[in-house]
Every structure is written in C-alpha cells, then in structure tokens.
Image: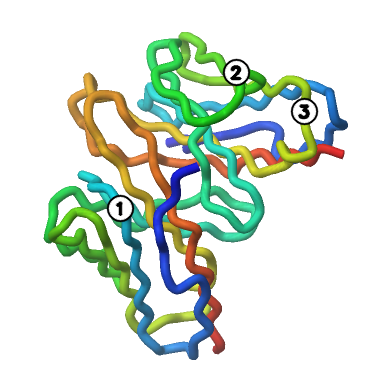
Amino acid sequence: GQQLNQSPQSMFIQEGEDVSMNCTSSSIFNTWLWYKQDPGEGPVLLIALYKAGELTSNGRLTAQFGITRKDSFLNISASIPSDVGIYFCAGQNYAGNNRKLIWGLGTSLAVNP
Amino acid sequence: DAGVTQSPTHLIKTRGQQVTLRCSPKSGHDTVSWYQQALGQGPQFIFQYYEEEERQRGNFPDRFSGHQFPNYSSELNVNALLLGDSALYLCASSLAWASGANTGELFFGEGSRLTVL
C-alpha cells in the first residue's frame, strides 16, 4: 500500500537532547498528523496541522506543515525517557467524509536516561 | 468520556478460519475506520464506515468485510484467514463532515492483535 517517506527510521539519543524527524510525500495533502505509538497500544494523536506553513506546538513538541504541502517535520525538545516509542506521520486529504490516512513507516525513538 | 474500545485484545486463529473484531467509537463520533498494522509497518487503511455504509475502501480483498450498526459501533470480519493476515487491527473513530466540527482527526483504539497459525 501507499506509504510516506519518514526519516530517520530510528534514533538513539541521550535524555535532554532535542529530536527532529520528518516526512515527505510525492503527493499533496491538506492535513498532516503526527502520532505516537507505544508497544501494544494504538496510535495517539500528538499534533494536527491543517495549513501549509503552519507551525504548531504541543508542550515540548513542535510540528510544521511544509509550504509545498508535501512534507512535515516534528521536533521534540529536551527529550525525557517517556518519549520512547514509535512516531508516525500521516497525511490526509480531508474533504467531505474522507478520513483515509496515508502513513509513514515510523521513527523509533530510544532515550538513554 | 469513553475513548475508542476494541475487542478482543488478542486472539489466535488457524488458516481458513473466520474472525470478527469489534469496535465502539469515541463518544460523539459517527465514523469508523479500520486499519491493519503488520509488525514494523505503519497502519494500512482497510475501509471506512459512515451511516452504516462502507464509504471508502483500501486495497484489501473481499475476504475483508465490515458492518456499522445504528449506534455507530462497527465490526470487521475476515474470512478464509491466511498467515499474512496476522497483524494488529486498529479501529479509529472520527466525526463526519456533516457534523460541522470537522477537523479530520482520528482517534484510535488499542487494537486487536490477531495471530493466524
């Protein structure tokens, strides 16, 4: 199935470091969503972006909707051990009742205390 | 406010059997989508239900079918199970466009882990 290009695939960082990951697509989306998934759990929505160029923060998380509408990035500042998990980007062409999400393969984050 | 609930959480089936997974959407939500997530992969869209009808479908065979009930809950049925159907099946709920509070955001349940032997 269709998937987005998400990088890096995995990261191993020290507690307190900042993290950056990004997602690109060959097609345009009008919505970008960032989710975090812990083992054995469903994805949990972190940030939703609806406008090209939009920069949105949620605590230590900041995400931006790329101007071209084909990319997005997520930054995590001052990482802590509970940030460990898999982060997924998802693109959506939200119109009418369309809710289909196209997902990246995920960025696996490990934080060394 | 109850979130998305799915059942069962884990189940084991053998090839050729049939399985039914269940989902109750978040309170106030009327649209249910189903995703399949293989190990190490991102979720893949199976289909979406709104007003008790399948509205969109991903690239999955007819062995995958679903249903939505008047209370917005939903079932995913998979017939003639294959080994490759082993995955985490995620249900997501959202609001339909017509509800006017449309943000496109999907809220996920914890998933049903299906193992086919």
**Disc 1 residue type (three-letter):** Ser
Q: In this view, does B1 lie to the left or right of A26?
A: right
Between A58 and A70, the residue placed more toward the observer is: A70
- Kindly check if marks 2 and 1 are in contact, taking CB atoms under 8 A apart as contact: no
Examine the rendered structure and indicate whether residue B112 appears above or below residue A10: above
On whether disc 2 and disc 1 are found on a single subunit, the reply is: no
Q: Which residue is the site of mark 1? A: A26
The reply to whether residue B51 is in sight is yes
**Disc 2 residue type (three-letter):** Ser
Between A102 and B12, the residue placed more toward the observer is: A102
| Mark toward the viewer: 3 or 1 | 1
Question: Residue at horizontal 26%, vertical 65%?
Answer: A63
Q: Is residue A23 left or right of residue B64?
A: left
CA neighbours of label 3 inside 10 A, class few (<14), some (14 to 19), many (20+)? many
Residue B37 % position (x, y): 59, 45
Residue A46 % position (x, y): 36, 57
Q: Is mark 1 on a helix, strand or loop?
A: loop
Q: Which residue is the site of mark 3? A: B81
Subunit of label 2: B
Examine the rendered structure and indicate whether residue A58 appears above or below residue B110: below
Between B76 and A71, the residue placed more toward the observer is: A71
